[in-house]
Image (spheres, grey):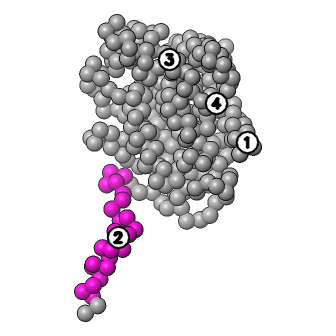
Amino acid sequence: MARKHTFPFLLIVCFILGCNRANKHTKLPHIQKKERTPIASKQAFPLLSRDTTITLLFNNEHKIKTTLRFPNQSIFKGTIITLPGWNFSRNQWCDSTSFCQKALQEGYIIVQPEMGKSIYCERFYPETRTDWRKYPTRKWIKDSLISELQTYHILHSTHSNFILGLSTGARGAALLARDLPHIFKGCAVLSGDYDQTKFPMDNLYRGFYGEFKNFPDRWLEDDNLITHITDLKVPIYIGHGSNDNVVSIEHSRLLKQALDSSHNSKYEFHIDSLSTHNYSYWNSEIDNILEYFSKITSSSLTSD
């Protein structure tokens, strides 16, 4: 007779424990079981520990992969999101620089979303090229990716979270740091572009926003870091190569000028007089960036 109550009992247990919580498009990674030592006792400790790749939907249609890499050591230092440039693989931060090796050694979780041909805009427009609409927006990162990771206590607001980007990914990193100061303690941007109005003939901007002469407000207001520079509250490391022939160094100079004009001194500015737009230069900045993140963490912990 007891067997008649088994199935209803399991349904009740499943309801209580949230058996249906997992997104069917997400491969659930390993749940953290061993204890680690967080930086501060007030932190919500991450629930995951094993390298994995999750898949989330963009616009309920396009599958976007994100790789999570976890340190092997017992100390959890924080989380860093790495944003790739235009049509760069998410894995190139690890494959072409020493960043992942060094960041993992320091105890950081690394989050690597596949962004494809994204320029990290908040939304699309009627004039946005149809073939570019399958690549995720900045809004997707905030509403889907970060929201999903926080269910596993990754990118929790009490952690030392940072965001790092190169080329177009630098634009995305700076905008996300501006949008989410309650999540990110700082950011680092290399060879990035920040004010589209200064380059109205750039085909990437034109392909997303339409022609500057037809939609000046979009170009000036939407996704323009310089226009809304006073909203950038977190410290930022800015790097660029003087010989960059892909993204003009003028972008980084404009960003520095805007910070100075807004009386924001929470930045470091580094120009490499010999470097171009390549991984050789970006790799040369890794130690500087990790040191910068460590200084931010130390100062924030001291102030707490």
Amino acid of disc 4: Pro
Q: Is residue 269 shown left or right of residue 133? A: right
Please name the residue that numbered disc 4 is placed on. Answer: 235
- The quarter of the picture where residue 45 lies is bottom right
Q: Nearer the viewer, mark 4 or mark 1?
A: 1
Task: From the viewer's side, name the closer residue of 98 and 45.
Answer: 45
Could you tell which of marks 3 and 2 lies nearer the N-terminus?
A: 2
Majority secondary structure of the magenta segment? helix
Magenta segment boundaries in residue numbering: 3-26
Name the image quarter holding the C terminus: top right
Please name the residue that numbered disc 2 is placed on. Answer: 14
SS for callout 3: loop
Please name the residue that numbered disc 1 is placed on. Answer: 303
x and y, in percent, of residue 93 in the image = 54, 35
Circle 2 crowding by C-alpha within 10 Å: few under 14, some 14–19, many from 20: few
Q: Nearer the viewer, mark 3 or mark 4?
A: 3
Q: Residue at x 28, y 42 (%)?
A: 60
Q: Is residue 191 shown left or right of residue 284? A: left
Does the magenta-highlighted stretch encompass residue 22?
yes
